[in-house]
Image (spheres, helix red, strand yellow):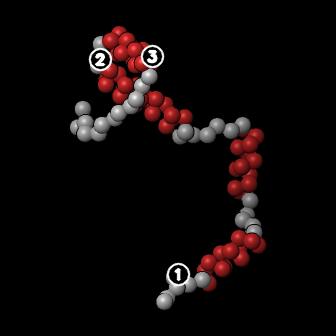
Amino acid sequence: MANRTEQLAARVDPTRMERIRYASALQGTSVSTFVVEAAYERAEQVIDEHRSTLVPSDYFDQLLAALDEPPRAIPELVAAARKVAEAPAFEQL
Protein backbone atom coordinates (compact mmCIF):
# COMPACT_ATOMS: atom_id res chain seq x y z
CA MET A 1 0.00 0.00 0.00
CA ALA A 2 1.19 3.51 -0.77
CA ASN A 3 2.53 5.75 1.97
CA ARG A 4 -0.48 7.57 3.39
CA THR A 5 0.59 11.12 4.15
CA GLU A 6 -2.48 13.11 3.12
CA GLN A 7 -5.29 13.86 5.52
CA LEU A 8 -9.00 14.30 4.80
CA ALA A 9 -11.52 15.93 7.15
CA ALA A 10 -15.22 16.50 6.75
CA ARG A 11 -18.16 17.73 8.78
CA VAL A 12 -21.10 15.35 8.64
CA ASP A 13 -24.63 15.64 9.97
CA PRO A 14 -25.50 13.06 12.65
CA THR A 15 -27.88 11.05 10.47
CA ARG A 16 -25.30 10.54 7.75
CA MET A 17 -22.59 9.76 10.27
CA GLU A 18 -24.79 7.08 11.83
CA ARG A 19 -25.33 5.46 8.42
CA ILE A 20 -21.61 5.63 7.63
CA ARG A 21 -20.71 4.02 10.96
CA TYR A 22 -23.31 1.31 10.41
CA ALA A 23 -22.12 0.55 6.88
CA SER A 24 -18.47 0.47 7.92
CA ALA A 25 -19.33 -1.92 10.76
CA LEU A 26 -21.19 -4.18 8.32
CA GLN A 27 -18.05 -4.35 6.19
CA GLY A 28 -15.80 -4.81 9.19
CA THR A 29 -13.72 -1.71 8.46
CA SER A 30 -13.00 1.50 10.26
CA VAL A 31 -15.05 4.58 9.40
CA SER A 32 -11.90 6.15 7.97
CA THR A 33 -11.18 3.20 5.68
CA PHE A 34 -14.82 2.99 4.62
CA VAL A 35 -15.02 6.70 3.74
CA VAL A 36 -11.71 6.73 1.87
CA GLU A 37 -12.63 3.63 -0.15
CA ALA A 38 -16.10 4.97 -0.96
CA ALA A 39 -14.70 8.34 -2.00
CA TYR A 40 -12.01 6.70 -4.12
CA GLU A 41 -14.52 4.43 -5.88
CA ARG A 42 -16.75 7.44 -6.62
CA ALA A 43 -13.77 9.45 -7.89
CA GLU A 44 -12.87 6.64 -10.30
CA GLN A 45 -16.48 6.48 -11.51
CA VAL A 46 -16.65 10.24 -12.14
CA ILE A 47 -13.31 10.23 -13.96
CA ASP A 48 -14.41 7.29 -16.13
CA GLU A 49 -17.65 9.08 -17.00
CA HIS A 50 -15.68 12.07 -18.27
CA ARG A 51 -13.05 10.17 -20.26
CA SER A 52 -15.16 9.82 -23.36
CA THR A 53 -18.08 11.50 -25.01
CA LEU A 54 -20.82 9.58 -26.72
CA VAL A 55 -22.54 11.17 -29.70
CA PRO A 56 -25.07 9.85 -32.18
CA SER A 57 -23.48 8.15 -35.20
CA ASP A 58 -24.86 10.72 -37.68
CA TYR A 59 -23.28 13.54 -35.67
CA PHE A 60 -19.97 11.66 -35.62
CA ASP A 61 -20.16 11.11 -39.38
CA GLN A 62 -20.75 14.85 -39.89
CA LEU A 63 -17.79 15.62 -37.66
CA LEU A 64 -15.49 13.32 -39.64
CA ALA A 65 -16.72 14.81 -42.93
CA ALA A 66 -16.04 18.33 -41.63
CA LEU A 67 -12.53 17.32 -40.58
CA ASP A 68 -11.87 15.97 -44.06
CA GLU A 69 -12.75 19.33 -45.64
CA PRO A 70 -9.86 21.64 -46.53
CA PRO A 71 -9.34 24.44 -44.02
CA ARG A 72 -10.93 27.79 -44.72
CA ALA A 73 -9.70 31.15 -43.55
CA ILE A 74 -11.93 33.11 -41.19
CA PRO A 75 -11.17 36.79 -41.78
CA GLU A 76 -11.62 37.81 -38.15
CA LEU A 77 -9.20 35.13 -36.97
CA VAL A 78 -6.66 36.01 -39.66
CA ALA A 79 -6.80 39.66 -38.57
CA ALA A 80 -6.46 38.73 -34.89
CA ALA A 81 -3.47 36.46 -35.59
CA ARG A 82 -1.80 39.16 -37.67
CA LYS A 83 -2.34 41.73 -34.89
CA VAL A 84 -0.76 39.42 -32.30
CA ALA A 85 2.16 38.55 -34.58
CA GLU A 86 2.92 42.23 -35.20
CA ALA A 87 2.59 43.32 -31.55
CA PRO A 88 5.75 43.51 -29.43
CA ALA A 89 6.10 40.72 -26.90
CA PHE A 90 6.42 43.31 -24.11
CA GLU A 91 6.68 47.01 -23.76
CA GLN A 92 10.02 48.53 -22.86
CA LEU A 93 10.03 51.34 -20.32
79, above or below 70, in the image: below
Residue 89 x %, y %: 53, 81
* Label 2 SS: loop
Three-letter amino acid code of the residue under disc 1: Ala
Judge the density around disc 1: few (<14), some (14-19), many (≥20) Cα neighbours within 10 Å: few
Judge the density around disc 3: few (<14), some (14-19), many (≥20) Cα neighbours within 10 Å: few
Residue 89's disc is: 1
**Residue marked by disc 2:** 29
Estimate the spatial distance between the alpha carbons at disc 1 and disc 2, rounded to whole Å.
59 Å
Q: Nearer the viewer, residue 83 or 91?
A: 91
- Which residue occupies 64% across, 37% down? 54
Among numbered discs 2 and 3, the one appearing first in the sequence:
3
42, above or below 58, in the image: above
Residue 23's disc is: none
Q: Is residue 54 left or right of residue 69?
A: left
Three-letter amino acid code of the residue under disc 2: Thr
- Which residue occupies 72% across, 38% down? 57
Q: Is residue 20 left or right of residue 78?
A: left
Judge the density around disc 2: few (<14), some (14-19), many (≥20) Cα neighbours within 10 Å: few
**Residue marked by disc 3:** 15
Estimate the spatial distance between the alpha carbons at disc 1 and disc 3, rounded to whole Å.
59 Å
Query: Which residue is situated farthest in the front direction here?
Result: 14
- Which residue occupies 38% across, 31% down? 10
- Which residue occupies 74% across, 52% down? 65
Residue 80 x %, y %: 68, 74
Q: Nearer the viewer, residue 76 or 14?
A: 14
* Label 3 SS: helix
Among numbered discs 1 and 3, the one appearing first in the sequence:
3
Three-letter amino acid code of the residue under disc 3: Thr
* Label 1 SS: loop
Contact between marks 1 and 3 (CB within 8 A): the answer is no
Q: Nearer the viewer, residue 88 or 78?
A: 88
